[in-house]
Amino acid sequence: MKQSIVSFIVGVIFALGLVISGMTNPTKVLAFLDLSGKWDPSLAFVMVGAIGVYFLFYRWITKRDTPILEKEFSLPAKKGLDKKLILGAVLFGLGWGIAGFCPGPAIVNLSSLNPSALIFFAAMTLGAGIFQITNLAK
Amino acid sequence: MIDYSNFTPYSALMGGVLIGLSASMLLLFNGKICGISGITGQLLSFKTSDKKWRWFFFFGLICGGAIIFQAYPSSQNFQSETSTALLVVAGLLVGYGTRLGNGCTSGHGVCGISRLSFRSTVATVVFMLAGVISVYVFRHVLGVGQ
């Protein structure tokens, strides 16, 4: 239960960060990705802030033997590149550039009841579901 | 040409710091990487047994949104110019692509790059480039939907 409460609080703070930074506004995201138009570089600062903080904390936290509420850290073990990683990133990037929503903002925007965000979220869930089904079949 | 009228470096930086802090908290307490597509995508999996904290995280995101949209109503007054058909295509691509590629802006972009993961850094460069190309093609070549 403690871990679930932490997860909830993390979700809340993460959502505040996404909205304050402007990531939940698709117009702003597309203006960041549109290098040939009127370019709005703001979202580069989101990455700078988030990576700057996590870079330092990651080093400090992983010096511990274990997390506070769990037996061990679950860190990605894969090292090399593979086709799935690259193809997945290409498909994600194409979709991100079409509508300006990525997964976090799509979920946070559910509470705004913005019709475009709701349609996007439904399709995103379907896309993830299709992956899950096709992956199970293998 | 930089659009200075819409340039918001301070709020962007502050939002980024909150994202970094919350991701750090998930690592410190639960030992988990804060990748949104992975955490929530596995809610759709039959194999995943640890769904409880994932649901709490998901509802945390929605509640956080509700709180800040209530406090600053202007932050939810955006208008997506994308047509319904293209929203569906984009959603399918993002949902499928992030699961296939094992991550999105948070898992690869924020956590992965900070961990100096080669895989995540390459993935981030690839999806950023694909995003830039996508906007260029849809907005400036085809001129549709946006």
Image (cartoon, coloured by chain):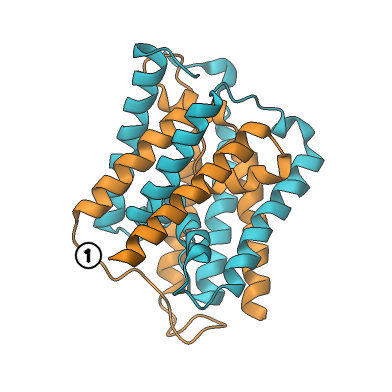
When the figure is inspected, residue B77 is found, relative to residue B50, above or below; the finding is: above
Residue lying at 19% horizontally and 56% vertically, measured from the top left:
A81
Where is residue A122 shown, x and y percent of the image? 57, 45
Q: How many callouts does the rendering have? A: 1
Colour in which the image shows chain B = cyan
Residue lying at 39% horizontally and 24% vertically, measured from the top left:
B135
For residue B100, side relative to residue A47 (left or right): left
Residue lying at 45% horizontally and 15% vertically, measured from the top left:
B144
- Location of residue B93 (image quadrant): top left
Structural crowding at the residue carrying mark 1, measured as other residues with C-alpha within 10 Å and reported as few (<14), some (14–19) or many (≥20) = few
Q: Secondary structure at mark 1?
A: loop
Q: Which amino acid type is shown beneath numbered disc 1?
A: Lys
Colour in which the image shows chain A = orange
When the figure is inspected, residue B138 is found, relative to residue B113, above or below; the finding is: above
For the N terminus of chain B, give its image quadrant. top left
Residue beneath disc 1: A79
Where is residue A115 shown, x and y percent of the image? 67, 33
Where is residue B128 shown, x and y percent of the image? 35, 37
